[in-house]
Image (spheres, helix red, strand yellow):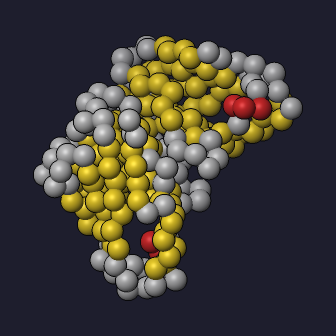
Amino acid sequence: NAGVTQTPKFRVLKTGQSMTLLCAQDMNHEYMYWYRQDPGMGLRLIHYSVGEGTTAKGEVPDGYNVSRLKKQNFLLGLESAAPSQTSVYFCASRPANGELFFGEGSRLTVL
Amino acid sequence: ILNVEQSPQSLHVQEGDSTNFTCSFPSSNFYALHWYRWETAKSPEALFVMTLNGDEKKKGRISATLNTKEGYSYLYIKGSQPEDSATYLCAFKGNKLVFGAGTILRVKS
């Protein structure tokens, strides 16, 4: 039982490049989330999903896209990376009415 | 924009001291209030999920209370230990799950 797994763990991009972060959970959770963590700002919600095939915007969605084609996977895409997207990204999932289970984080640097 | 505020921003205490911090959140459209403990270089881990006004939850030396009518929750740590050093996050669940910025606790031995 792996819980929540994020890949890759580290990535360095140049401005304008694109990439996808993959989040996978094996707990059959309905809800999945992508957060970014920046110094002094806690965790800010980028996008979330309440079930397979659904996505919704969070607090800071601009510059990101997401997809939830399979219940166990939630993908976060950066179409054209910018230095302001340098951050640590956390994926999380939870059952209905339950607490969040987090992945280990993905550190992204955009030069 | 949902306003979830935590205070203080940081706290330094001596081993053995008891301490507490606050999470303030909107009093309308409330579904749940979560508390998480986040150690450096790790991922946040859930401490409590609280749903009812007046809820009190306890796990070892850590406890929490909830007041949904006035929109606040307190987290208490009794007899702090160095291993309690972490960032403590609260998250308000209304239509979305929104986190506060956290309280950084450092316990000196």
User: Residue B52, how many percent across, how many down?
Assistant: 36, 17
**Residue B98 appears in the rendering:** no
Q: Residue at x 58, y 41 (%)?
A: B38
- Height in image: A49 above or below B31? below
Can you tell which quarter of the image residue B61 is in? top right
Q: Nearer the viewer, residue B42 or B3?
A: B42
Side (left or right) of A33 relative to A55: right
Q: Nearer the viewer, residue B28 or A44?
A: A44
User: Residue A31, how many percent across, how many down?
Assistant: 26, 41
- Height in image: B106 above or below A6? above
**Residue B4 appears in the rendering:** yes
- Height in image: B73 above or below A52? above
Q: Nearer the viewer, residue A49 or A3?
A: A3
Q: How many marks?
A: 0
Side (left or right) of A66 relative to B109: left
Q: Residue at x 31, y 62 (%)?
A: A76
The outermost residue toward the front is A1
Q: Residue at x 25, y 62 (%)?
A: A66
Q: Residue at x 39, y 39 (%)?
A: A3
The outermost residue toward the left is A53
User: Residue A82, how many percent across, how many down?
Assistant: 43, 80
